Image: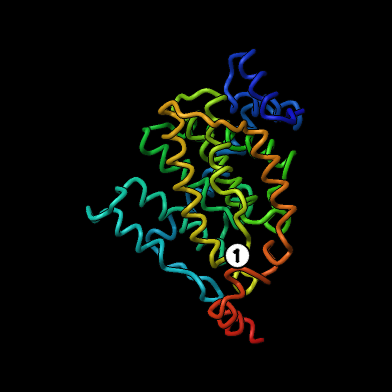
Amino acid sequence: MFVNKGIELFNICKQENISIWEYTIRCEEENSGLSRMEIIEKMRKNLNIMREAAEYGLTNETRSISGLIGGDAIKLNRYASSNNTLTGEFMVKAMARALSCSEVNAAMGKIVAAPTAGSCGILPAVIITAGEKLNKTEDEIINALFTASGIGIIIAKNATLSGAEGGCQAECGSAAAMGAAAVVEMMGGTPEMAMDAAAIVIKNILGLVCDPVAGLVEVPCAKRNIAGAVSALTTADLVMSGVTSRIPFDDTVIAMYKVGKQLPCELRETAMGGLATTPTGLRLSKEILGK
């Protein structure tokens, strides 16, 4: 059985001198009855689907059925290699991949909900792009996905991953926290550092509302995937420099849950508030839904 708290996870990893990804695999072996190799191969399939979704929009103008989003990932990908970027090819490529997954999702393509469909672009963009930059093997990238899974399990046990229950902080926030922790371990950071990264991400996205225009997971969701990917990658660097979180991971998760419960229903995926009810949001909704 997977532990319930981040502090418990940290203590076990420290006592046994193992990573979060190793602990996660061991728990999955115990819970599922599958062999270690079977579990890793299942995760490899997830990675392959993530790759396909993250890459497809880079060379194809993928458009959603509603017409709200599409064709932007390919623009970002072209811009990434233009030598004119402010943040560099690495960051812009990550942004493009996050957007590609969101566009594929909105076009009814295959994605991995990690942890949700609305936040599906963050983890692939972060893991794949960081893996390239760090010259990691596919197996090492798969390990990072297990790290992300371990962090996601703790969040799910103590808060929520649902935008309808906790706002976008619970979806894009959780995905970004998972990604930041995964990259930290990928870079050689300790479990404690990985949880610091997850905590910092959650602190920085606390209170983010879920306000999809026309009730569709497209606007502003796709661009929030970009923001989540950037947050995860920059926070990983922040923590690897030695910066820590004054508020522990477990406390930030509790705070996220409480804040989510305090959000009015209009700001929790109902399309009854926020950007969804701006003049433009209402006009777009009427054009799409005809009412």
Residue 272 vs residue 189, the one in the foreground: 272
**Which residue is found at the position 48% from the left and 41% from the top?**
127
Position of residue 276 measured from the top left corner of the image (x, y, whole percent): 60, 72
Position of residue 235 measured from the top left corner of the image (x, y, whole percent): 46, 38
Tell me the crowding category of disc 1: few under 14, some 14 to 19, or many 20 or more residues within 10 angstroms, Cα based: many
From this view, report whether residue 211 is shown above or below residue 235. below
Q: Amino acid at mark 1?
A: Val
Residue 265 vs residue 54, the one in the foreground: 265
**Which residue is found at the position 56% from the left and 49% from the top?**
205
Q: Which residue is mark 1?
A: 217
In the figure, residue 78 lies in which quadrant? bottom left
Residue 79 vs residue 167, the one in the foreground: 167
- Where does the N terminus fall, quadrant-wise? top right
The figure's colour scheme reads: rainbow
Position of residue 66 measured from the top left corner of the image (x, y, whole percent): 56, 76
- Where does the C terminus fall, quadrant-wise? bottom right
**Which residue is found at the position 44% from the left and 26% from the top?**
242
**Which residue is found at the position 44% from the left and 41% from the top?**
233
Total marks shown come to 1
In the image: residue 4, left or right of residue 95: right
Position of residue 187 measured from the top left corner of the image (x, y, whole percent): 44, 28
**Residue, far left:** 83
At mark 1, the secondary structure is: loop
From this view, report whether residue 262 is shown above or below residue 291. above
